[in-house]
């Protein structure tokens, strides 16, 4: 006989209790390990998706505009491709899909991906499975692709072609839904909606022969960083710049394909010239609709702003060439008016006038006869005559005189007038740049290299992006599912541990006399505790081993749920279980430690009892004063957390869980004190007997209350978080729209509507937003938004003060106006939805989000709005930060009640060329709520599991109590009690415990959730919550009644005979 | 020698302290056996537990061979019970999960010596005539047999003091007779001090010294 033998005997003999303890530990381990596994599995699944979809792509070189495909040769392995977003229409059915990823690729892509020969050819396109499904397309079907037409000239500049922003291409489906056709550069958990088009075909249709906008770069080892290689190998043409040698006047001319040299490129050009000791002459050439002196005018004249000897001395001076002076009959000192078009940021063409004083008249010869001062304007520069001009703005051809045609024929774009550069920049400078060329004197062969060295290609929009690394980082997820499941499983785990403790306690109580015998036989208390601890350790380890299996099963079930019943929370069926050793180890360690802790906690009560007391079955209770103090401390801390969360000083989730756990602890400690102090003395009647039993074993009773309270807490608090269909987050706009192609014209003006071909719609008003495309920052995107979409509303929208705010910095009455404030440290004020801010961007008010070197400070948080996927900044800041961004791609729409559907249909049809996708704002808001509510359903299911554990605990306790009190109950039968009396007595005890658990859980949930509920407008679904709690109570009572009936079914009178 | 000197025992109750024993003294030398009788609730078992180191007295001292176990720390007190005292309870208190042999060996699990206890246990079980029931579980034994196992367990460590609390209380006459005989026989053979608490006058009559606990005091039993 050895201790080991005794241990073995104990484990086998008390197997029923031990199995219960083991199951408790297994459940706790399973729940925690499973929760951690869910988090890890979601992350790993997102990671796998990214890796699978990127294929061999490690980085990309990309630009908003197009560049030479030869640049791809600088990187190996690499593949040149075109990446765009587009609208695809199935010609036969008319089914239309917006927001489709369009990839132009060829054999080089196939080789790059390790699948030689696997690329579409000719007019054939491949569709991803999801897109084919959405369109109902199959091989051989015709589809129409609508994409933005590339334009080097900014659409929002005078020369941008605003009415011709898109291109439609007819193609034939070659393969649809093949499993390998899932290449995507965009990290997204949902299905890939992509079309793969032959590169050459796309280049031809977009008039971009030999050009691409993206290079896929594979992983290489031992090479210089990609940025460095890019800088060494790019050419000026790749960033839309060119150097022309002008024989006359003998210089280099740096020009841009966009007709305007950006400020960054200009700065680099000056710097490069300085480094070579060359001189520079910045030039800004513009088209004046007329030059008027007195009553005479000449139409459509090129005017150049520069600071050369041709320029006037004064800011308001103008130099005319002698041809112009003659035509205008102008002499030095005359007033001259220049009338010209400008395209303003209000999406309208304005005609403006500037006044000058004729300061000089120069002969049209030498430097003054220089057509090279004007950049190439498509539709103008190459025209043979003035009447052939085809500019994107209105021309009055009747104003053109024969003399003007002769001038064009003889001098082409030679300027008729010159003004000071500063004056010209003030009049015609745009966000795209305020120079049309920079002349470098004298011409130098070294200048090209010097300029490329001085210019950071990223500043010119040509960027190297480590797309794999960024995507993998994003795959860490916006939401840590593991964390949330651990949070919500925490109460389930606590329930399991309480149950473990309860069963172990019952086991110990069952063996109290045995312990007394051991003490009498000379076993010290330490020895006995160590034997029990050893038993507990064996059970904890075995339970943990079982729990690891349970964790895998639990994780698999949760993921199955996320793929099916709860798909609304994740929006993908592509999640799979990844058995992560660290996650399982965490669960196992936590299960073992908490299991042992639970055992140790139960054993702690044995020490103060004398051996004789143990032989008599006596147990001692802990000190009540300690419980009072601990309860008070917990309550105080809970209150502090609630207040901190209410004030926004603490994360709501942390406040909720922290305060909830502390409140539950405090409530249970106070109840423990109350029960130990015989707080139920005053109750009379049959029920009294039952309630006295609650006090007979106060520890057990508290454990039961804790079990029920934990589950109720989870269920009740989740109900408080549930979102209804509130329309406050729509700002009163019934519709919103996203456009695939930018709308440059203002649809609120008659001219704009005419240009856009929108039929008259009474009562319809557009609020156009500028858009910088980026990651969806809403709960619909599982990936961490590294680069969130940015919107900019017009200034008038900010003043309308629509939408409700959850919080704002300072005490602004209209937080929208904070967007226009100038922050001292240069940060850009931004607004986001409170949900996105907290759960996706993980920021608080006042905190910053850095994006491409720009700091966005969160100045206000919208309350449950349609803007959950983006950051919002002022239009002024937007244009400063993203000068290349063109037009408007997001709209809030007002429509008369009752005509909302009609307006949506009409606009979708009228603007179909723009991929204008109109949807009710309420539907978008509902889709966000659906995600949130699905999360809540998921977590409520966990609460339900906790309730099952609570009910099991309650039933076990009830059975145990009845068995222990068989003699007492038998005696009652002997003295005339009927079975229903006993039933009432036992049921009263359980109903009391159940009620206490429900009340404790519900009250603690109400207090802990108060900050979150207040932040959401203070709405509490009292009715549904009441029904839910009533259901929980009814379930508990029914299960208690069944357990009571079962327990009382055995013959009680036999218990008397053993007396 | 067991020396119980002026031992008192009081329990606190809501209505004030309840005195169970008052100024009780008793001396027994090695090999001596005594029976203590008295009505229920008179404090017999309390006295037994105090003598065996299971419950400290409120006043007075208990020494065994001049050692007061209650002056020792918990660990040594446990060792004292293990090494020097054997208990036999009315309700045998066998571990249901262990076999007969294992029950007898339970005290040796915490013994600090390495004697050949299995052999001794077998011998004791032979002496109590249970040599053919070594592997049986308590549930498979009769009341008398269980009590004989308890007796063997009490003697496994060759205690100097054997205390029996109503050892025949739950037994039929024949079994009681057998257990009583074995108690006297085995304790006498080991020169053990034996104290038996009993209601049974026939059992008490077999002891050379008899006492009666009345009004919290120990008196020589009336003939």
Image (spheres, coloured by chain):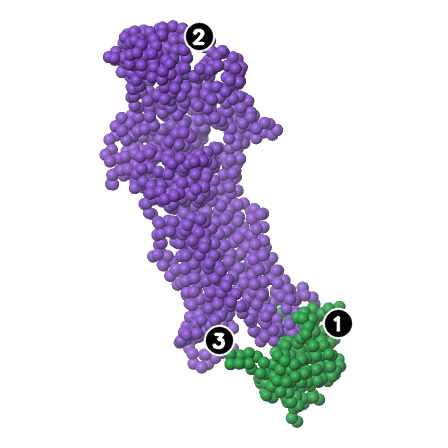
Chain colours: A purple, B green
Letter of the chain that mark 1 sits on in the rendering: B
Disc 1 packing (10 Å; few <14; some 14–19; many ≥20): few
Letter of the chain that mark 2 sits on in the rendering: A
Residue A498 numbered mark, or none: none
Which SS class for mark 1? helix
The residue mark sitting in front, 1 or 3, is: 1
Letter of the chain that mark 3 sits on in the rendering: A
Task: Give the labeled residue for mark 1.
Answer: B119
Which SS class for mark 2? loop
- A958 lies above or below B198: above
Instruction: Give the total of numbered labels.
Output: 3
**Mark 2 vs 3: CB contact within 8 A:** no
Residue A269: % across, % down: 48, 19
**In which image quadrant can residue A3 be found?**
bottom right
**Mark 2 vs 1: CB contact within 8 A:** no
Could you tell me if residue A556 is visible in this image?
no
Left or right: residue A34 versus residue A405 is: right
**Mark 1 vs 3: CB contact within 8 A:** no
Viewer-proximal residue among A93 and A128: A128
Residue A1051 numbered mark, or none: 3
Left or right: residue A349 versus residue A632 is: left
- Residue positioned 67% across, 75% down in the render: B70
Residue A129: % across, % down: 44, 35
Name the quarter where the N terminus of chain A is drawn. bottom right
Which SS class for mark 3? loop
Could you tell me if residue A1011 is visible in this image?
yes
Residue A615: % across, % down: 60, 75
Viewer-proximal residue among B180 and A366: A366
Task: Give the labeled residue for mark 2.
Answer: A248
């Amino acid at each position: 006989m050895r201790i080991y033998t005794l241990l073995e005997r104990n484990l086998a003999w008390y197997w029923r209790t031990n199995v219960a303890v083991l199951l408790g530990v297994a459940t706790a381990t399973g729940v925690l390990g499973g929760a951690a596994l869910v988090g890890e599995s979601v992350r790993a699944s997102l990671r796998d998706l990214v890796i699978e979809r990127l294929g061999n792509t490690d980085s990309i070189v990309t630009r908003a505009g197009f560049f030479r495909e030869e640049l791809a040769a600088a990187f190996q392995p690499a593949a040149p491709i075109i990446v765009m977003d587009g609208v695809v229409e199935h010609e036969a059915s008319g089914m239309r899909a917006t927001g489709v990823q369009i990839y132009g690729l060829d054999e080089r892509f196939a080789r790059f991906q390790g699948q030689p020969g696997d690329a579409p050819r000719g007019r054939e396109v491949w569709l991803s499975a999801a897109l084919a499904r959405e369109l109902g397309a199959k091989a051989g079907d015709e589809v129409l692709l609508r994409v933005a037409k590339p334009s080097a000239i900014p659409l929002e500049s005078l020369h941008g072609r605003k009415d011709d922003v898109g291109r439609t291409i007819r193609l034939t489906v070659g393969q649809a839904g093949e499993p390998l056709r899932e290449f995507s550069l965009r990290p997204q958990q949902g299905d890939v909606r992509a079309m793969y088009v032959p590169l050459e075909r796309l280049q031809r249709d977009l008039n971009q022969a030999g050009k691409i906008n993206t290079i896929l770069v594979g992983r290489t080892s031992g090479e210089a960083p990609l940025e460095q290689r890019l800088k060494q190998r790019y050419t000026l043409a790749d960033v839309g710049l060119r150097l022309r040698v002008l024989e006359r006047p003998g210089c280099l001319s740096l020009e841009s394909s966009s007709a305007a040299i950006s400020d960054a490129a200009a700065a680099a050009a000056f710097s490069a010239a300085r480094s070579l000791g060359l001189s520079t002459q910045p030039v800004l050439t513009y088209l004046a609709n007329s030059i008027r002196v007195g009553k005479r005018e000449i139409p459509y004249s090129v005017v150049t702003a520069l600071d050369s000897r041709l320029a006037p001395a004064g800011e308001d001076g103008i130099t005319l060439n002698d041809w112009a002076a003659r035509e205008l009959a102008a002499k030095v000192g005359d007033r001259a008016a220049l009338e010209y078009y400008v395209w303003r940021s209000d999406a309208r063409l304005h005609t403006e006038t500037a006044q000058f004083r004729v300061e000089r008249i120069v002969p049209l010869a030498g430097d003054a006869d220089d057509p090279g001062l004007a950049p190439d304007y498509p539709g103008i520069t190459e025209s043979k005559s003035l009447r052939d001009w085809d500019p994107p703005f209105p021309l009055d051809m009747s104003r053109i005189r024969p003399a003007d045609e002769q001038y064009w024929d003889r001098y082409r774009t030679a300027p008729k007038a010159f003004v000071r550069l500063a004056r010209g920049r003030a009049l015609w400078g745009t966000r795209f740049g305020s120079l049309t060329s920079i002349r470098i004197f004298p011409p130098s062969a070294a200048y090209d290299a010097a300029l490329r060295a001085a210019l950071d290609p990223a500043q010119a929009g040509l960027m190297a992006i480590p797309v794999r690394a960024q995507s993998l980082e994003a795959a860490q997820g916006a939401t840590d599912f593991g964390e949330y499941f651990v949070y919500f499983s925490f109460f389930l785990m606590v329930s399991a541990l309480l149950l473990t403790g309860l069963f172990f306690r019952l086991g110990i109580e069952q063996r109290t006399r045995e312990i007394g015998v051991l003490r009498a036989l000379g076993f010290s208390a330490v020895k006995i505790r160590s034997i029990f601890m050893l038993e507990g350790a064996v059970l904890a380890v075995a339970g943990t081993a079982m729990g690891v299996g349970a964790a895998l099963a639990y994780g698999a079930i949760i993921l199955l749920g996320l793929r099916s019943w709860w798909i609304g929370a994740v929006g993908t069926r592509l999640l799979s279980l990844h058995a992560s050793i660290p996650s399982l180890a965490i669960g196992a360690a936590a299960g073992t430690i908490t299991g042992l802790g639970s055992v140790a906690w139960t054993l702690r009560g044995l020490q103060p009892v004398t051996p004789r007391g143990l032989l008599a079955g006596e147990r001692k209770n802990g000190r009540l004063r300690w419980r009072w103090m601990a309860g008070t401390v917990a309550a105080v801390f809970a209150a502090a957390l609630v207040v901190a969360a209410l004030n926004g000083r603490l994360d709501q989730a942390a406040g909720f869980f922290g305060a909830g756990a502390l409140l539950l602890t405090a409530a249970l400690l106070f109840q423990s004190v109350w029960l130990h102090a015989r707080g139920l003395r005053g109750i009379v009647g049959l029920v009294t007997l039952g309630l006295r039993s609650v006090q007979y074993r106060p520890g057990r009773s508290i454990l039961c209350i804790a079990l029920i309270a934990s589950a109720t807490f989870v269920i009740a608090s989740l109900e408080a978080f549930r979102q209804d269909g509130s329309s406050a987050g729509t700002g009163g706009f019934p519709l919103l729209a996203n456009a695939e192609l930018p709308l440059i014209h203002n649809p609120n003006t008659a001219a704009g509507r005419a240009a856009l071909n929108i039929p008259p719609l009474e009562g319809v008003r557009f609020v156009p937003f500028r858009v910088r495309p980026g990651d969806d920052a809403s709960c619909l995107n599982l990936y961490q938004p590294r680069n969130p979409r940015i919107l900019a509303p017009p200034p008038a929208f900010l003043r309308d003060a629509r939408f409700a705010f959850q919080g704002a910095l300072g005490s602004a009455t209209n937080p929208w106006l904070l967007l226009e404030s100038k922050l001292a440290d240069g940060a850009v004020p931004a607004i986001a939805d409170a949900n996105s801010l907290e759960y996706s961007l993980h920021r608080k008010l006042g905190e910053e989000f850095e994006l491409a070197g720009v700091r966005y400070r969160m100045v206000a948080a919208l309350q449950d709005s349609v803007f959950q996927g983006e950051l919002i900044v002022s239009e002024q800041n937007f244009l400063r930060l993203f000068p290349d961004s063109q037009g408007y791609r997001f709209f809030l729409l007002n429509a008369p009640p009752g005509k909302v559907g009609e307006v949506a249909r009409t606009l979708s049809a009228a603007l179909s060329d723009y991929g204008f996708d109109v949807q009710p704002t309420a539907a978008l808001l509902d889709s966000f709520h659906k995600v949130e509510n699905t999360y809540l359903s998921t977590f409520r299911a966990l609460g339900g599991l906790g309730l099952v554990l609570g009910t099991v605990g309650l039933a076990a306790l009830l059975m145990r109590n009845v068995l222990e009190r068989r003699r007492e109950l038998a005696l009652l039968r002997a003295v005339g009690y009927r079975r229903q009396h006993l039933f009432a007595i036992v049921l009263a005890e359980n109903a009391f415990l159940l009620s206490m658990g429900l009340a404790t859980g519900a009250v603690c949930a109400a207090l802990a959730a108060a900050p979150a509920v207040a932040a959401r407008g203070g709405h509490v679904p009292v009715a549904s919550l009441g029904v839910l709690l009533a259901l929980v109570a009814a379930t508990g009572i029914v299960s208690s009644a069944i357990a009571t009936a079962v327990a009382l079914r055995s013959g009680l009178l036999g218990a008397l005979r053993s007396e | 020698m067991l020396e119980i000197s002026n031992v008192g025992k009081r329990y606190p109750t809501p209505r004030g302290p309840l005195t169970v024993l008052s100024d009780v003294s008793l001396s027994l030398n090695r090999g001596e056996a005594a029976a203590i009788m008295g009505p229920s609730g008179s404090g017999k078992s309390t006295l037994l537990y105090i003598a065996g180191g299971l419950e400290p007295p409120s006043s007075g001292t208990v020494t065994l061979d001049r050692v007061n176990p209650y002056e020792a720390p918990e660990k040594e007190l446990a060792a004292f019970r293990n090494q020097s005292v054997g208990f036999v309870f009315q309700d045998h208190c066998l571990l249901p999960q262990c076999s007969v042999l294992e029950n007898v060996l339970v005290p040796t699990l915490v013994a600090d010596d390495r004697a050949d206890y299995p052999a001794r246990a077998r011998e004791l079980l032979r002496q109590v005539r249970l040599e053919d029931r070594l592997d049986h579980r308590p549930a498979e034994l009769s009341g008398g047999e269980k009590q004989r196992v308890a007796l063997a367990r009490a003697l496994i460590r060759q205690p100097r003091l054997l205390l029996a609390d109503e050892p025949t209380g739950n037994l039929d006459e024949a079994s009681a007779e057998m257990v009583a005989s074995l108690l006297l026989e085995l304790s006498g053979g080991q020169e053990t001090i034996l104290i038996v608490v009993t209601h049974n006058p026939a059992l008490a009559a077999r002891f050379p010294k008899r006492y009666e606990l009345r009004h919290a005091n120990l008196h020589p039993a009336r003939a």
